[in-house]
Image (cartoon, rainbow, N blue to C red):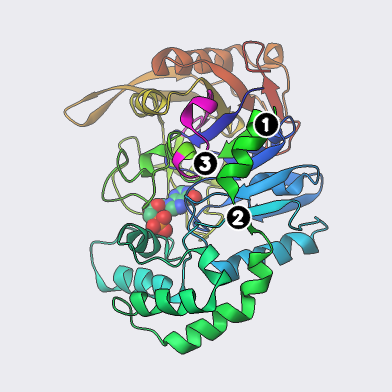
Amino acid sequence: MGNLVVIGTQWGDEGKGKVVDILAEQADVIVRFQGGHNAGHTLVIDDKVFKLSLLPSGIVREDKVTVIGNGVVLDPWKLLEEIELVQSQGVNIDPTRLMIAENTPLILPYHKALDQSREQATDKKIGTTGRGIGPAYEDKVGRRSIKVGDLRDDELLKHRLAIAAEYHDFDQQQLFNQLVHIKEHILQYVGPVAEWLNAQTDAGAHIVFEGAQGSMLDVDFGTYPYVTSSNTLAGMASIGSGVPHNKIPNVIGITKAYTTRVGEGPMTTELFDSIGEHIASVGKEKGTVTGRARRCGWFDAVQVRKTCMINGVTGIALTKIDVLDELKSIKICYDMHDGIPVYEEVPGWCSSTVGITQLKDMPQEAIYYINRIQELTKTKVVMISTGPERDQTIILPASLF
Ligand code: IMP
């Protein structure tokens, strides 16, 4: 396996956590490269459920090293909370297993306050997760971020806080004290990530880059302005970690067998009927982070064809196919006419695919559906997920393994 990046081809929540976990088995290092604790990755391992927001999914495999790259925005208190939670579930986390890039910008309390007050103040809501992600990225490009490495030097930290205070309303001394209070806990993980990752990959280590959110939430290519504030596409793996793009040859596009979206903004194949409700309930379509109900709709092949193109997806991992098990017929959007989706209808399989591990055991109608997805998106399917557990997966022969 060469280095690979895992991204979502839709609006996030495609089931990246499970796929990253499977791919991580053959990797040495797992890297988060954008977003923050707005992401939610659920991992089901044996009888344990891990809900991760900021830590890379590889954290649950104790022989792997995990990295938070500079493209992430980091809430240091949330990180410490999450470390404690995962440790309480029996996972060892120490500086040999977790490294944070020193140039990672911090999310501070004023970012969260701003995110939430903006959402409350307007009738044109984005539906953000309210965690301060957007304001923290604004400060990064506004050149007034506090980077995690700044915690090493009290004078520098004071200076940076004074600059931030020109834009934000907060008590500088109080925040300084709060940061000093936690800095030792955080700084033990902080290091020169780009140098380390490049040395690792040059020495033959395999790296999985773990995307968060989905391509349709990308700040450039998504449904702007109803997007997140980072680039969620595969190219960001390079910028957000310091590993050059030509060292990341493979791109796995995690793709749900239907469409969901959380928050506001357009969604062309959205269902407002009992089928949408059925998909939401069978698929347990509720946000990992915010608990909000996800909007559900048919598979949008026009959208996924485009996101596969702009990410350079080398293989699709198709997830949650079993959620469609009970439907008598299924629609796929294959074209758009004046903003209206054009559908083809394919027969459902009306039998359980839960836990199937071999393609030959899949109903013919399900195979037909998967083939149509391959044809319409012009991208091969290399993995099919038939349930939340690690082993509820079909690995296809044409895949990377
Ligand atoms: P923000 O990322 O909190 O700024 O929210 C911007 C938009 O991205 C909102 O519509 C959120 O619901 C959405 N969003 C952010 N993170 C995720 C995610 O991990 N999955 C799905 N949607 C997300």
Please determine whether, in this image, residue 146 is positioned above or below residue 205. below
Name the secondary structure under disc 1.
Answer: helix
Which residue is denoted by mark 1 in the rendering? 23
Q: Secondary structure at mark 3?
A: loop
Find the magenta span and give its range: 239-258
User: Does the numbered disc 1 mark a residue whose Cβ is under 8 Å from ligand 1?
Assistant: no
Residue 62: x and y in percent read 80, 46
Front residue of 109/387: it is 109
Q: Residue furthest left?
A: 338
Residue under label 2? 100
In the depicted view, which residue is nearer to us: 77 or 8?
A: 77
The alpha-carbon separation of the residues under discs 2 and 1 comes to 21 Å
Q: Give the mark nearest the N terminus, 1 or 3.
A: 1
Dot in front, 3 or 2: 2
| Real-space CA distance between mark 3 and mark 2, rounded to the nearest whole angstrom | 16 Å
Residue 271 visible in this rendered orientation of the protein: no
Label annotation for residue 309? none
Where does the image place residue 281, in percent across and percent down from the top left? Answer: 55, 46
Q: Is residue 254 visible?
A: yes
Which of the two discs, 2 and 1, labels the residue nearer the N terminus?
1
Mark number for residue 211?
3
The image shows residue 167, relative to residue 322, as above or below, that is below
Return the x and y of residue 349 as percentages of the image width and height. Answer: 58, 20
In the structure shown, which secondary structural element does the residue marked by tag 2 occupy? strand
Name the spot of residue 95 as percent of width and height, x first: 73, 57
Q: Tell me: residue 175, above or below residue 329.
A: below
Give me the C-alpha separation between circle 1 and circle 3: 13 Å
